[in-house]
Image (spheres, rainbow, N blue to C red):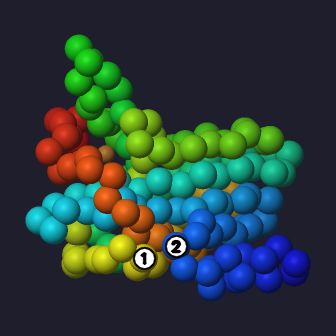
Amino acid sequence: MKRALFSLMLLATPAMAHDQMAGTLHIIHPSIPLPAGMAKSAAGYVTISNEGDTPEELVGVRSPFAASTTLHTTIFEDDIAKMRPVIGVPIAPGEVVNLEPGGMHVMFMGLTGTVAEGDMIPATLIFRHAGEVAVEFMIDPADGADHSTMDHSGH
Ligand SMILES: [Cu+2]
C-alpha cells in the first residue's frame, strides 16, 4: 500500500519520472519522446525491474495511441541503425531491463493523434506471467531523432 501511495505522489508531480509496481515488477517511467508533428511512428521507452524470484517476459504492448504497437530491437549494420521486431523481452529475476534509445524499444506505428509534451498516453503492457498491466507513457521532450525515417525493412 505504501508503494501505491508513493506512485500516486509521483504521478501528481509534473515533469517527473513516474513509476508503479505490478506484483513484483517495478515499472519505471514509460515515456515517448515528443514525435515530430508529421511523424507516423514513435518509439517508447521504459525500465522494468524484476524484483521477484521467477523469470518474466514482456511479450507485447497495446495502446490506442497507434494502429499497431510492437517490440523492437536495434541492430547496427555498417554503422547504420536498423530496427527489427522481437517476440519478447526476457526479464530474469533480479534483472533490470532498459528499453532505451539505440536499443530495445516499443514501436508505435500509425499514430492515431497528435500529442504534447507532458501528455500521458494510456497503454497496456502484456507480460507472460503477470498478464496485462495498465500503464501511462509520458510524452517527454523531443530527442531530435526522427524515428519514422529509420529503416524498418524487417517488418
Ligand atoms: Cu522501432
- The residue sitting at 43% across, 47% down in the picture is 105
**Quarter of the render that holds ligand 1:** top left
Residue at mark 2 to residue at mark 1: CA–CA distance: 7 Å
Q: Which residue is mark 1?
A: 118
Q: Residues within 10 Å of mark 1 (few under 14, many from 20)?
A: some
**Picture disc at residue 68:** none
Taking the image as shown, residue 138 lies to the left or right of residue 35, namely right
Looking at the picture, tell me which residue is in the foreground, 49 or 90: 49
Q: Residues within 10 Å of mark 2 (few under 14, many from 20)?
A: some
Taking the image as shown, residue 120 lies to the left or right of residue 25, namely left
Q: Residue furthest left?
A: 38
Relative to 155, is 2 above or below?
below
User: Looking at the picture, which amino acid does disc 1 mark?
Assistant: Gly
User: Looking at the picture, which amino acid does disc 2 mark?
Assistant: Ala
**Beta carbon of the mark 1 residue lies under 8 A of ligand 1:** no
Q: Position of residue 100 (x, y in %)?
A: 47, 44
Residue 87 appears in the rendering: no
Q: Position of residue 118 (x, y in %)?
A: 42, 76
Residue 74 appears in the rendering: yes
- The residue sitting at 32% across, 59% down in the picture is 142
Work out whether mark 2 precedes mark 1 in sequence or the reverse, and give the earlier one.
2
Q: Position of residue 93 (x, y in %)?
A: 79, 42
Please state, as top left, top right, bottom left or bottom right, where the N terminus lies in the image: bottom right
Label 2 with label 1: CB-CB less than 8 Å: yes
Relative to 134, is 129 above or below?
above
- The residue sitting at 52% across, 62% down in the picture is 30
- The residue sitting at 31% across, 77% down in the picture is 116
Relative to 34, is 3 above or below?
below
Looking at the picture, tell me which residue is in the foreground, 58 or 82: 82
Secondary element type, mark 1: loop
Q: Position of residue 84 (x, y in %)?
A: 32, 36
**Picture disc at residue 15:** 2
